Amino acid sequence: MDCRRCDAVCCRMSVTVMPSDSVPGYLLDTDEAGRTVMARNDEGWCAAIDPYHLRCTIYSQRPAICRQFDMGGDDCRLVRQDYRRQQHDLSTILSTF
Ligand code: SF4
């Protein structure tokens, strides 16, 4: 696993924000279960991501769940696999036009 060769797809996962986190309020949202989560941009990435460089703009203030994310772990592999499948499906659809 190499984060430099990834589109930061872990930052497309739902990120629950805990009361002990210190995320700026404008980046917060509430999910359907009423949990405080990181807001998302129109493309599905966390609202804190720099879309040009795919880096976290609040790295020193990122939620605990982001700090604890296991790079190369099961969730990392699954989200990368799903993203690759979506990209493949999209390119297949686009190639029919
Ligand atoms: S807070 Fe930063 S590390 Fe966490 S999902 Fe958002 S962009 Fe990624």
Image (cartoon, rainbow, N blue to C red):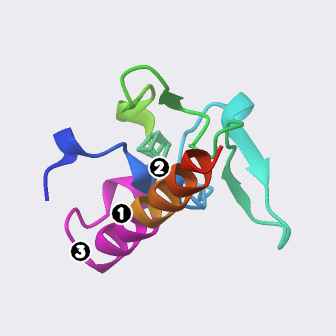
Q: Crowdedness of circle 3 by 10 Å Cα count: few (<14), some, many (20+)?
A: few
Q: Which quarter of the rendering shows the C terminus?
A: top right
- Look at mark 3 in the image and give the residue it sits on: 73
Q: At label 1, which amino acid type do we have?
A: Arg
Question: Mark 3: which secondary structure?
Answer: loop
List the single residue furthest toward the top: 52
Mark 1 to mark 2 CA distance (whole Å): 11 Å
Whole-percent x, y for residue 23 in the image = 57, 38
Question: Mark 2: which secondary structure?
Answer: helix
Q: Which quarter of the rendering shows the N terminus?
A: bottom left
Q: Which residues are magenta?
A: 64-82
Whole-percent x, y for residue 32 in the image = 86, 68
Q: In the image, 97: left or right of 92?
A: right
List the single residue furthest toward the bottom: 74
Does label 3 or label 2 sit earlier along the sequence? 2
Q: At label 3, which amino acid type do we have?
A: Gly
Q: In the image, 52: left or right of 16?
A: left
- Look at mark 1 in the image and give the residue it sits on: 80
Whole-percent x, y for residue 49 in the image = 49, 32
Does label 3 or label 1 sit earlier along the sequence? 3
Q: Is mark 1 within 8 Å of ligand 1?
A: no
Q: Nearer the viewer, residue 92 or 67?
A: 92
Q: In the image, 64: left or right of 43?
A: left
Q: At label 2, which amino acid type do we have?
A: Cys
Q: Nearer the viewer, residue 54 or 30?
A: 54
Residue at 44% of width from left, 35% of height from top?
Answer: 61
Majority SS type along the magenta span: helix
- Look at mark 2 in the image and give the residue it sits on: 11
